[in-house]
Image: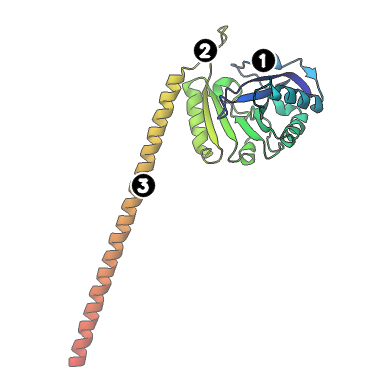
């Protein structure tokens, strides 16, 4: 396999943000997102065996004397799933007791990865320049431990992510749906998205969702009430008819 770098750092994305993590960055990517911050991983790299990568991960994970051992490893890129050995590496890491994350663009099918791997899968938004590349078969390959991420550069991206999430019922399908704002390029190649603006949009979405839930609950309550009233009306008519019939029978008997 071809490796760009292996290093130890703090996880900065997904729900694992803030945790110590060993990163294994594989070389090569078939997409060219406008805001990509790891273009250096498109080419080059060093050919390595799975065994040598595993050994370097072990060394980094042990750290210095007195430090706890790091048990979280992320396989990333580039696009790691372009290399068939990525799945083998994930299997070996799992067998050695590591928790394994694989971060992928969503363009490659993730169903070949070991089930225990936590899959962090992008859905490319329109302003990435790679919209429409998501493999829809991935939705069925994900489960409650996995995560889906949208990197958002504009209002259009936000609306796409919002609608995709609703249409495919992502909430409940995966552990977390992540809306991540694009950060500005230090060299000015692309602008960033104000995180506060995205937070405001998400807060509004939450408020709208809460309102829809409340309206749905109110509608269900009214339907139950209408059903109860209708049942009572039917029962009243039935009793009235029974009384009429009883009266008629009594008159007939008397006569």
For residue 214, which quarter of the picture? top left
Where residue 143 sits: x, y (%)? 60, 41
From what the image shows, is residue 151 above or below residue 138?
above
For residue 181, side relative to residue 33 (left or right) = left
Secondary element type, mark 2: loop
Q: Which residue is mark 2?
A: 191
Q: Residue drawn 27% across and 65% down?
A: 232
Where residue 111 sits: x, y (%)? 69, 38
Residue 78 shows in the view = no
Q: CA distance from mark 2 to mark 1?
A: 17 Å
For residue 51, side relative to residue 237 (left or right) = right
Q: CA distance from mark 3 to mark 1?
A: 49 Å
Secondary element type, mark 3: helix
Q: Which residue is mark 1?
A: 39
Mark 2 or mark 1, earlier in chain: 1
For residue 222, side relative to residue 21 (left or right) = left
Q: Residue drawn 21% across and 84% down?
A: 248
From what the image shows, is residue 140 above or below residue 159?
below
From what the image shows, is residue 168 above or below residue 194?
below
Residue 33 shows in the view = yes
For the residue carrying disc 3, how many other residues have a C-alpha within 10 Å: few (<14), some (14-19), or many (20+)? few
């Amino acid at each position: 396999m071809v490796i760009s770098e292996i290093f130890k750092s703090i996880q900065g994305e997904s729900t694992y943000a803030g945790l110590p993590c060993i990163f294994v960055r594989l070389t090569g990517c078939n997409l060219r997102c406008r805001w990509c911050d790891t273009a250096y991983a498109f080419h080059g790299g060093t050919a390595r065996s799975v065994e040598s990568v595993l050994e370097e991960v072990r060394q980094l994970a042990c750290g210095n004397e007195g430090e706890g051992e790091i048990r979280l490893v992320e396989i990333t890129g580039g696009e790691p799933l372009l290399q068939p050995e990525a799945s083998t590496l994930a299997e070996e890491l799992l067998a050695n007791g590591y928790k394994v994350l694989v971060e992928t663009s969503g363009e490659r099918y993730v169903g070949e990865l070991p089930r225990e791997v936590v899959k962090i899968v992008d859905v490319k938004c329109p302003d990435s320049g790679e919209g429409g590349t998501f493999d829809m078969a991935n939705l069925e390959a994900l489960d409650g431990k996995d995560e889906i991420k949208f990197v958002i550069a504009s209002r259009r991206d936000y609306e796409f992510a919002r609608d995709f999430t609703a249409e495919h019922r992502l909430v409940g399908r995966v552990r977390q749906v992540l809306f991540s704002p694009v950060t500005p390029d230090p060299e000015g190649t692309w602008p960033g998205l104000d995180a506060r603006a995205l937070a405001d949009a998400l807060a509004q979405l939450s408020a709208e969702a809460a309102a829809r839930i409340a309206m749905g609950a109110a509608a269900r309550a009214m339907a139950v009430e209408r059903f109860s009233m209708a049942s009572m009306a039917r029962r009243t008519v039935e009793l009235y008819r029974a009384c009429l019939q009883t009266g008629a029978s009594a008159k007939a008997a008397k006569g």
